[in-house]
Amino acid sequence: MIFALSGPRQLQPVSALKVSGRDLAIVLDLSGSMVREDFYFDGRQITRLQAVTRVGSEFARRRAGDRVALIVFGSEAYFATPFTFDTEAVARRIQEATIGISGRATNISDGLGLALKRLANSQAVSRVVILLSDGVNNAGATNPGGVAELAAEMGVRVHTIALGPKDLQSAEPGERGVVDATTLRAIAQISGGEAFRVKTTDDLVDVTQALDRLEATDSAGLTAEVYRSFWTWPAAMAAALALLAAWRQA
């Protein structure tokens, strides 16, 4: 019993979590145009949202070491997950994303603005926003360019992804479901980020891989000491001996 109370234990080898020192906010457009079926996966026609949730969730899972947050926007913007090292939780929320939950308009300014609001109190060495939209800013009172200038003042890089087969420059006048690639490119340039143009699912996969290279996660890790306890064995033996002694005395 004394041996059990001494708490015998063994230090277990544990892989340390690689910590990048980066806070990364993923800002996703959930406006009504994301239901358009103009993307393909394994030869099957899918919606823009399905393409984003498939590829985006895998991208989030690869961000181990970053503190990742998810913001979604339509007519309004809101936090789907706060900043966390639990990238699996963020990936699940991306997979569960639903059109219309935040309105069906496209409020790019508020989506980016909400990300900057949360990053304002961040102590991370590097602060990054990945902004994906498939439309034209048509809600909110703030100009996306002005929000991009605020990001630049804060030292936050904004990488933008313009999603959709057609943009304002290539579409017919009045055509719906087109993306304002020019504005998204300007947001990236003002903030010091990179702008990407995505027309197919393969393009989207390539972009996430390019972002992995731009915002690499390999760095020193958090240390942790994890022990395996063995006190139960001598305690069980003491209990067995006590039962045996009691039986012999009976």
Image (tube, rainbow, N blue to C red):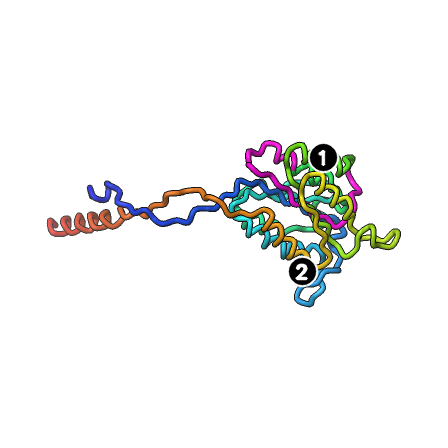
The residue under the point 77% across, 48% down is 181
Asked whether residue 95 appears in the rendered view, the answer is: no
Q: Quadrant of residue 38?
A: bottom right
Crowd class of label 1 (few under 14; some 14 to 19; many from 20; radius 10 Å)? some
Q: Is residue 244 left or right of residue 43?
A: left
> Which residue is under mark 1?
149
Image quadrant occupied by the N terminus = top left
Q: Position of residue 33 (x, y in %)?
A: 76, 52
**Secondary structure of the residue carrying numbered label 1:** helix
Report the magenta residues as a range: 116-140
- Quadrant in the picture for residue 221: top left
Q: Nearer the viewer, residue 158 or 45?
A: 158
User: Where residue 18 sits: x, y (%)?
Assistant: 48, 46
Name the residue carrying label 2. Answer: 202
- Please check the rendered image and state whether residue 120 is part of the magenta-colored stretch, yes or no: yes
Q: Amino acid at mark 1?
A: Glu
Q: Amino acid at mark 2?
A: Asp
Answer whether residue 241 is magenta in the image. no
Please indicate whether residue 10 sits to the left or right of residue 25 in the image.
Answer: left
Residue 236 at x, y = what percent?
24, 50
